[in-house]
Image (cartoon, rainbow, N blue to C red):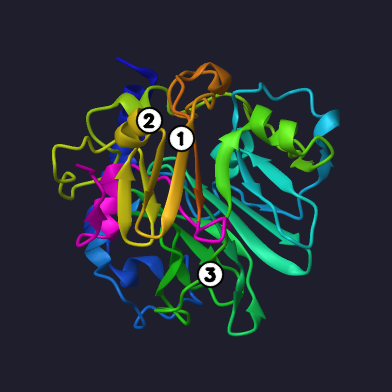
Amino acid sequence: MTAFGKTLLALGFVAWSGVALANPAHWEHEWPDTDFPRTTIDFSEVLEGGPPKDGIPAIDAPAYIRATQETRLDDREPVLTYEHPEAEPRAWPVRYLMWHEIVNDVVGDMPVAVTYCPLCNSAMIFDARVEGESLTFGVSGKLRHSDMIMYDRETQSWWQQAIGEGIVGHHAGARLTPLPGWMESWGEYRARNPDGLVMDEPDWRRAYGQNPYVGYDRAARPFLYTGEDPPHGIGPLERVLRVGERAWPFSRLREEGQVSEAGVTITWTAGQASALDSRVIAEGRDVGTVRVSGAEGEDVPHDIPFAFAFHAFYPNGIWMLGD
């Protein structure tokens, strides 16, 4: 049995035992300040992920070092990058996001939420302001369609990470603004920004650089997902590029190298390791880096979820399969 299979066995009972408890009455002791009557979802879709509220600790106000000072990262390791036009570029290594899932940060004068859900491979950076209020986020311990449900500490509202939407509580129906960050290899970031910033290792006892979900992106089925498989014969754990409500399979992008359609230009280049393959992240198979630009060459907000997650959150989405 693979390490991921053992993880499923260890967490599966805890998670599935929560299915029958998908009812606000059973959550109010843990969430006394959440306005459960205000919701946009069916509560039966919410499952316990295993760890409790804040069992996966978000990082607040992370420390940074210069790219030239960083010696722990392998060139192939993935980082989540954001290059704000009025601030120094910065990168958040996935080896840290794997264990913390949310980083509450400030870029320039803008509060941001840097998020990563390993179970659906969704990596999104959001402007953390809603209606003029700055929010900070934590990990709820709940999943929906195998995607992390975040919560904001200010109102205890629940948020769907993959789409940045408030789903329960005061902010139900609100949307976070996605920022044009992207996933790339550490070598790519460092070559372009030798004096750029990179998040320093957090002061937590975690196996940074190790992947606790060994073999996950080669598994037959997603963890705690009971929805439909993607159409067109696309594997549920194949990576796709999502821009808005369109998805491009990575298999196509890898084959073509560059695609220009639907108002964007997409390039794929080799050299980035999968964070969800081998036990050591740096040894993961090459999944490549995708960049997305608009008509004026500007970076475009996007995500690289697994195909099942795109299909779950965008059931009427458009699949960009080419000729």
Q: Are marks 1 and 2 in contact (CB under 8 Å)?
A: yes
Do the CB atoms of the residues marked 3 and 1 lie less than 8 Å apart? no
| Vertical placement of residue 36 versus 223, above or below | below
Mark 3 or mark 1: name the one nearer the start of the chain: 3
Q: Is residue 45 left or right of residue 115?
A: left
* x and y, in percent, of residue 122 in the image: 44, 48
Residue 309 on the magenta span: yes
Who is closer to the viewer here, 63 or 158?
63
Residue designated by label 3: 177
Residue 268 image label: 1
Alpha-carbon neighbours of circle 1 within 10 Å: few (<14), some, or many (≥20)? many
Residue at (73% x, 37% y) in the render: 192
Q: For the magenta stretch, what is the residue range?
A: 294-323
Q: Kindly identify which numbered label has been placed on residue 23.
A: none
Q: Position of residue 307 (x, y in %)?
A: 28, 44
Which amino acid is tagged 1?
Trp
Pointer 2 residue: 254
Q: Earlier in the sequence, mark 3 or mark 2?
A: 3
Q: CA distance from mark 3 to mark 2?
A: 29 Å
Dot 2 falls on a residue whose secondary structure is helix
Coordinates of residue 264 in the picture (x, y in percent)? 43, 55
- Dominant secondary structure of the magenta stretch? loop
Residue 87, quarter of picture? bottom right
**Label 1's element?**
strand
Question: On the picture, is 35 further left or further right than 88?
Answer: left
Q: Earlier in the sequence, mark 1 or mark 2?
A: 2
Identify the residue at image location x=71%, y=58%.
84
Which element is circle 3 on?
strand
